[in-house]
Amino acid sequence: MAANILDWTDSWFEKLDSESKADNAGSIAARFSGEVAEGRLPFCSMPFMSELLHDLAGLEDYVKSFDHMLLLGIGGSALGARALQKAFFPQQDQPCHKGPWLWIADNVCAGTLDAYLEKLPLEKTLVAVVSKSGGTIETISQYFLVRSRMQEVLGDSWNRNTIFITDKNKGFLREQADQLDIRTLEVPDNLGGRYSVLSAVGLLPAMFMGIDYRAMVEGASAVLSPLASRDLNADILRRHPSFRLACWGASLMDEGFNELIFFSYVPQWACFGQWFAQLWAESLGKEGKGSQPIPATGATDQHSVNQMFLDGPRNKACLFLTCPDLPEGKEFPSDIPANFAYLKGKKFGELIHAEGLGTKMALSANNVPLVEIKVGSENEEAAGRLMGLLMAATIFTGWIMDINPIDQPAVEMGKLLAKARLGASGLENEKKSLNNFLNTKRAEQPF
Ligand code: PA5
């Protein structure tokens, strides 16, 4: 199997003095080992994995007996599943697909939810409600409506078609599961949503789609096990690709590169860009620090945002995803006009490699520090390695920046204001701010 490679040639690693960020590698290695031992980094040590793989194997026949899975979740409870769906289950977006179908309801869109409720054959649908906290309003509000409809259609047996992925002990979904006898899988302690793709959160939908989720786990643990090992020390950490990425990412921020493009020239892996964007932004946007992740898709975005990448503000760096092993596609016919004659005898798949090379060179020529992530194959094992690499790199970047990459305190304010607006009890300060806001004369202009 071809190896995954990080190509640092165009990264400016030396010019940015990224190496200096590794000065504290000894204390970071000690901290990492300590947190692994205390169970605070389960995305890396995966202490839950053997039990989960066992449980998933036991559930396989049941899960695959459904034609549809309707996943209710948001943020880290949905983005991993969508990335896996787009990467490894593209047939659902292609003509003549005959099932199974995964539907991911990760927004507050009444039109979409109505369509699911009206059109899905609920007797053949497994509803997977995914929420670590068990209380996220976007997810739980959808659950209430789906539950009512399921009760109407399926009667008392509605819970047979329902599974929760949530905390083992806490939260509203856990209470519901206990009261209503609903099957559950756990989100382990200390596993935040954006680090949870390789738990039941991502693996259950992966199994439903027939994705080789075990290979994905193996790929991730190949990258992460040296970090989870008791032998971790400064030297091992300094050489680890995730730590090098973190040193690079943090030194870029110091030099004013406050945007980080995730440019995928593996078209079906483009949604890993959205997954990475949430991971990076929610983990690192703290205390006025961080860099804004920008997911982009080659070749599509060459005709969209690439002009800005190349000639807009010089504040951008790039993670550039490629794979030499993409499908070759059909050969061009011979009856093509002279001005396209260079395509003759070539296959359609050659175009994406040529365009990727061209874009990568153009970005470098325009002073965009760039690390190329070459995945050896477009398969699950390689994807597991990629996700493991990026999750670890994000943690290390946060630690080098001296912020907490696990929490997301700033997003609370908007959530509380929305609840106050809907009349939730308490929240007196939020209600006061809302009144002030709503009573302020707006500067409005019709158009
Ligand atoms: O990464 C995170 O922690 C968040 O994006 C959560 O995944 C998101 O807020 C959903 O939370 P929950 O899984 O508790 O419903």
Image (tube, grey):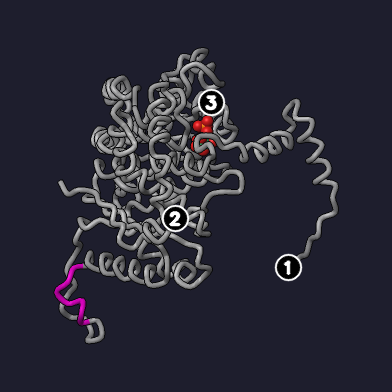
The span from disc 1 to disc 2 (Cα, nearest Å) is 32 Å
Percent x, y for residue 213? 28, 35
Q: Which residues are magenta?
A: 341-347
Q: Earlier in the sequence, mark 3 or mark 2?
A: 3
Left or right of 410 in this view: 23: left
Q: Quadrant of residue 218?
A: top left
Amino acid on which the number 1 mark rests in the picture: Phe
Q: Nearer the viewer, mark 1 or mark 3?
A: 3
Queried on whether the Cβ of the residue with tag 3 lies below 8 angstroms from ligand 1, the answer reads yes
Q: Residue at x 33, y 63 (%)?
A: 10
- Mark 2 = which residue? 295
Residue at the disc numbered 1: 447
Mark 1–mark 3 distance (CA, rounded to whole Å): 42 Å
Q: Position of residue 38 (x, y in %)?
A: 42, 21
Answer whether residue 344 is magenta in the image.
Answer: yes
| Residue 48 location, quadrant | top left
Q: Position of residue 351 (x, y in %)?
A: 26, 68
Q: Is residue 211 visible?
A: no
Residue lying at 39% horizontally and 27% vertically, measured from the top left? 42
The mark lying in front, picked from 1 and 2, is 2
Q: Which residue is mark 3?
A: 134
322 or 177, nearer to the observer: 322
442 horizontally vs 48: left or right: right
- How far apart marks 3 and 2 lie (CA) works out to 29 Å
Q: Residue at x 22, y 86 (%)?
A: 338
Label 1 element class: loop
Tag 2: residue type? Pro
Give SS at disc 3: loop
- Quadrant of the frame with the C terminus: bottom right
